[in-house]
Image (spheres, rainbow, N blue to C red):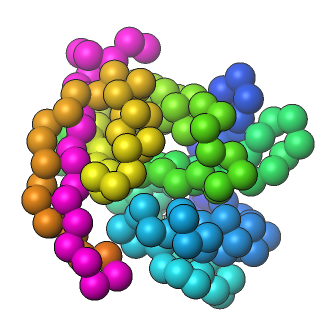
Amino acid sequence: MNDDRPTLHTDRLRLRPFVVADADAVAELAGDRRVAEMTQNIPHPYPPEAAVAWIRGHPARFQQDEEVVFAMERLEDQLLIGAIGLVLDLPSRKAELGYWVGVPYWNQGYCTEAGREILRYGFSRRKLHRIQARHFDRNPASGRVMQKLGMTYEGCLRKSLLKWDEYLDVLMYSILEDEFQL
């Protein structure tokens, strides 16, 4: 299978395809309970073999126009610090933005920086009309990222997701192509 997944750049980050060699770092960073509890699908603990399976699935999901996932890598030291991507619905020209950042890299603006580049990619290269994102109400930092990206709050999906035997409220944001400043 031809792997033509893109690599993107920001001032401080390289957004690149994951490779299997990233699995241990993914399991450690994403598997931290503080990260996992703020996401819908990340388990805790997160075994490295699960990270390998996740990474190995990326090329096929990209080729099938289902998803594009990027490793967030710091330019200064080539450290993997998180993940960001889009779950695509190309017939509707929309996608859902998702991301996580390892705890040592929180509150440094990396997610907002990467998010801007992903929105640019989605609107300019994927020709999307709408990009949406959701976060648990107990994770206001993620909501601030969405606001900084220019996304509009659309509402609360009350007790709509089950995470670790607890139903959680989910807050929805979106941005349309004509609202995004390339």
Q: Residue at x 72, y 52 (%)?
A: 104
Which quarter of the figure is the N terminus placed in? Answer: bottom right
Residue 156 x, y percent position in the rendering: 13, 48
Q: Residue at x 35, y 39 (%)?
A: 143
Q: Which region is colored magenta? A: 164-182
Q: Extreme right residue here? A: 77
Res. 160 in view: yes
Q: Is residue 48 left or right of residue 66?
A: right
Give yes or no for residue 29 being in the magenta stretch: no
Q: Extreme front residue here? A: 138
- As displayed, is residue 81 above or below residue 43? above
Which quarter of the figure is the C terminus placed in? Answer: top left
Res. 1 in view: no
Q: Is residue 89 left or right of residue 48?
A: left
Q: Extreme top residue here? A: 181
Q: Residue at x 12, y 42 (%)?
A: 155
Give yes or no for residue 179 being in the magenta stretch: yes
Q: Is residue 105 left or right of residue 148?
A: right
